[in-house]
Amino acid sequence: MSTIADDLPDSSHCDLALIEVLRHQIEVGGVLSFREFMELALYHPNLGYYCKNLRTIGPSGDFVTSVSQTPVFGWLLACQFVEWTENRDFDAEARPVWVEAGAHTGQLALDILDFCQREFPKTYQKLCYEIVEPSPRRQMAQRERLAAHQDRLHWTRSWDDYDPHSLSGVIFSNELLDAFPAERVSWDADAKQWFAWGVTLEKGELSWCRLPNPQAASVERWNRTFSPALTAHLPDGFTTELNSDAIQWWHQAASRLKQGHLITIDYGLREEEFFAPHRHQGTLRAYCQQRQSSDLLARPGDQDLTAHVNFSQIERAGWEEGLKTVSLLSQETFLTQIIKTTMERRPQSPLLHPNHVKAFKTLVHPSHFGRAFSVLVQEKDPGVPTKQPHHQQPLNEYPPS
């Protein structure tokens, strides 16, 4: 992911608020694209939401996640990863690895590794668990939390640290892609073209504006993404998002996979679902103190910004790197499949203890996390030709192959 923040002067030794950084950027350039605004708001090295706030998750934070609710989520993933690892005939020279990107506090890694050490000691002993984490501050916090498993762990800063087709095992992320900076675009019905939103200053305050003079390459990309058959029926001002960074990230991750699985768990929709009438203002939302807001420009650096993942585009990126889609399911269906397999093969598993079954129900209940999140699983098998599906099915009905 490119970083406008990398070009900024270091503000670690001053009390400069992010709003002042944004004002300076706008005064110099006249306007920021929303993507640039979102990147600074979330990822400025010292003042961005994710870089300065290490404790934003949980009941006392801005939002809750499956990980913050219960360790059972990590235990279930461990069971699935062990099955994928033990049932695959890896190349003799390939050591199976589990690679987590966007590990945040390291809690999910801790839940997975603790459970694997207790329940699957043979797998644990040969396991290499890697974390892709660009933030030195977060790396430090993760190392501290995961100290008990230091012999199994390795950190890298980006996919550039891996050679193409060098990883065999599982690459995964949880609630990562929805936080990549996104473009916000709207349809101009009179001009029959898309335009992007930017951020400017109006009487000293951050304000929305139409991004002037878009690059020809950007216009071509918008027109290529949204077909004329679709735009012919869109009302004037219909707004949605494009997340090229998330697509690029998936390309990078997929290209590093030699054999095994690539999986993401996140908020998301199929491409056509973004254009339902009730989504005419897009899916971008802000979160602060357990409350959702549509005021995306408020409190930069102090509120989370997120947009739904376009699973159709992510899926195509995997196909282009030689992966096939195993499944695209609701979290409810994905985790239920794991617990059913556990009941059949490991009836004494602690996952089946009544207290943990209660936590499991929270993870899969439609009014909690079960329907809010979806799980895309793609696979690379050098011995099997990749065939792309000829049609797409609704998100929660895409069957395992």
Image: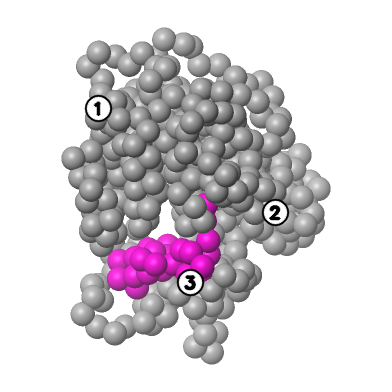
Residue under pointer 1: 126
User: Which comes before the other along the chain, label 3 or label 2?
Assistant: 3
In the image, taking residue 388 as reference, residue 365 lies left or right, namely: right
In the image, taking residue 236 as reference, residue 365 lies left or right, namely: left
**How many numbered circles does the render carry?**
3
How far across and how far down the image is residue 401, in percent? 59, 19
At 29% from the left edge and 26% from the top edge, which residue is drawn?
122
Residue under pointer 2: 367
Q: Amino acid at mark 1?
A: Lys
Q: Secondary structure at mark 3?
A: loop
Q: State the CA–CA distance, disc 3 to disc 1.
A: 37 Å
For disc 1, the neighbor class at 10 Å (few under 14, some 14 to 19, many from 20) is few
User: Which residue, as the protein is rendered here, is positioned at the far left?
Assistant: 151
Q: Amino acid at mark 2?
A: Ser
How far across and how far down the image is residue 163, in percent? 25, 31
Q: Quadrant of residue 16?
A: bottom left
Q: Secondary structure at mark 1?
A: helix
Q: State the CA–CA distance, disc 2 to disc 1.
A: 39 Å
Question: Which residue is more in the foreground, 236 or 169?
Answer: 169
Is residue 326 visible from the viewing direction of this image?
no
At 71% from the left edge and 41% from the top edge, which residue is drawn?
272
User: Which comes before the other along the chain, label 3 or label 1?
Assistant: 3
At 31% from the left edge and 45% from the top edge, which residue is drawn?
132
How far across and how far down the image is residue 342, in percent? 52, 29
Residue under pointer 3: 60
Q: Which residues are magenta?
A: 39-66
